Amino acid sequence: MKKILLPLFIFSAMNCFGQAGMWTWISGANTLGSPGVFGTQGVPSVNNHPPGLYEYCEWKDKQGNFWVYGGWDPSYSDLWKYDPLSNEWTWVKGTGFTNQVPVYGTQGVPNPANTPGTRESAAATWVDTVGNLWLFGGALQGNDLWEYLIATKEWMLMNGTTYASAPGVYGIKGFPDPANVPCGRLETCSAWTDALNNLWLFGGTGVAAHGGGGFLNDLWKYDIAANEWTWMNGSDSAYALGSYGIMGVAGVNNSPCGRLSYTKWKDLQDNFWLLGGCVNFGVLNDLWKYDLNTNEWTWMAGPDFLNDAGVYTSNCVFDSTNFPAARVEHRSAVTDNCGRFWLFGGYFSLTSIYLNDLWAFDPAQLKWNWISGTNVGNQGGSYGTLGVSSSSNMPPSRWGAVSWWGNDNRFYLFGGSQNGTNSNYSDLWVYTPDSNCISNCNAVPVASFTAPNHICSGTCTSFLNFSTNAASYQWSFFGATPPTSTDVNPTNICYSSSGSYDVQLIATNANGSDTLLLTNYITVYPAPPAQAISQSGDTLFAIAGATSYQWFFNGNIINGATDYFYIAPASGDYNVVATDENGCEVEAAIFNVIAAVSNGSIQEEEITIFPNPVEDKFTMHYSLPIAIGITIGTAVEISIYNVLGEQISAVHLPAASSLLPTCSINVSTLPSGLYYLEINSAGKTFRTKFVKT
């Protein structure tokens, strides 16, 4: 019998809100300082939401879900997931308490008890090409690198040290080394994943190799497969000065200055971009591009001086004169499906202005578009009605917020702080672009899917396609039958052998393709051991050792018959389904069972055991029907079985003794528990029970 897979039903909240050119408040509180609604861990709800916090760590997984971890004031260490299809938050992991210390475990070994502990002050985050979540630094300037395995809900320490203010080991620039490690740092979100699944990290503040602690401009690459860091660019000293070179011209000597850095855009050619940040005496709005192939930085736009007020020429047009003001704490920066860069809010420190402006940058045109918000700071915002779009809706000004670009081509904004106070937002907003303000791009597809992915050998599963902007699909199911499919939602994909199997989806439209390869995505458990049913008198025995059992009579379930044995009250066909610890099932059947009255079994009252329960030994008395049933000259076997059906001891009575009405048996050496006493003679079986104390 195969494990049953229940169908998956999806409710799309996107049908309920999201008018073009408008903001919609969709979740969380519209007041500052909300403690959050945790609900039940692991259970999604539209009522759940994280506490109002500042500088959460954030990710977007391969299925299009949004994740946050940590956050500050107070400091948390909880992991949350938001599903934009259902508009539900899930408290996934953590204690719900503040100021939790890390539990490092063993490096490279996942464990449900592991946790990075509280994380604040802009830790770096990545999503690797197989969809796992990565985290570095933050908190107390640690240089610990963590991986979170979504499938098993486990954290794993991958690299780095376990203490605060950890200094870096830079090695030789451009050469990987197992001993290399970036210094512990915080206040950087500039972290990118390249197409080869390497993780990249830039800047922040920490303890460099030379010159003590301060603002950094070092660029690092982490090779996941080799578990090695490489210092790629920048200085190994704090407070390094920038070298701008000529705007638009790459150069081996070009480099952004050391800074607190908060943006992490990546264009369609796999180049990395960053904007602005903070240095000692102010904030920046210079725009930089890094080319992986040449290991060169290029100053692309913006001034090379501090505290520029920007240029807010006009809304809803890509204009060469438009430019956002200098800012810091602007982590709410994402790349859309067309490769354009989006930016919301932050802090202009010269005049203590907190911003709520929304911008989009086209790296092909090198032009900015002022989409929404104002160029006047410290705006209170307007929430309107939860879930209802309105032209008057506007998020309040903030810094330290996080954001995502949804698979639905919308900009999502969450959390952050108001005007430098310790009260933080827990509100989640979505902005739906207006084609009159920013053109609908010829969007490339985004491949995404999910499936019940822990199944039993010999069973099948089905896939639910979450891809966007795609016209056709090519699936590859390694180790399965069938091995490929072009269906939108393939069904009955069957796996005959245990193991871990990759699944690949290529989503395609006229503008290109997107490939999602999830390694070891399908886990197929081994088949349980074969089952069999044996009969002893009136009792049917399955093979012991399974996690659970269920007996059936003539094809109908027997309520309450969940032990490995069953006393058959009637003749007929019996079968049992045994289930192992993985939920995998195996079946055995026995046909034409002859019930107790036909094969010599007797009622329990025909054998008397005294005392029962027994401590040392008992006396067994044969009643008259047994005496009649056991003829003179026939030997008798008296056996004792435990509840697993294992024979513990046997007593042989010779023929001359077969009509003795009593027999004394010593059971003082048996462990406490329930036992079966069985009498066999001349092909007949008699049974009763006793309890050993």
Image (spheres, rainbow, N blue to C red):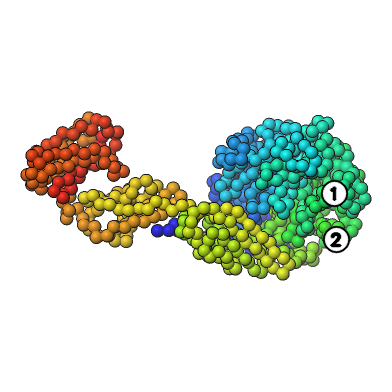
Q: Is 45 left, or right, of 421 in this rendering?
A: left
Task: Estimate the x, y position of residue 469 in percent, counting from the top left.
Answer: 68, 65
Q: Nearer the viewer, mark 2 or mark 1?
A: 1
Foreground residue, 641 or 331?
641
Mark 2: secondary structure: loop
The residue singled out by tag 1 in the image is 297
Task: Estimate the x, y position of residue 371 in percent, counting from the top left.
Answer: 80, 58
Foreground residue, 303 or 516?
516
Q: Is residue 37 above or below residue 609?
A: below
Q: Residues within 10 Å of mark 2 (few under 14, many from 20)?
A: few
The extreme left residue here reads 632
> Amino acid type of disc 2?
Gln
Q: Residue at x 24, y 38 (%)?
A: 649
Q: Is 502 left, or right, of 593 in this rendering?
A: right
Foreground residue, 353 or 437?
437
Task: Give the spatial CA distance, label 2 vs label 1.
Answer: 19 Å
Mark number displayed over residue 365: 2
Q: Residue at x 32, y 61 (%)?
A: 555
User: Label 1 near label 2: C-beta < 8 Å?
Assistant: no
Q: Quadrant of the C terminus?
A: top left
Note whether residue 123 is visible.
no
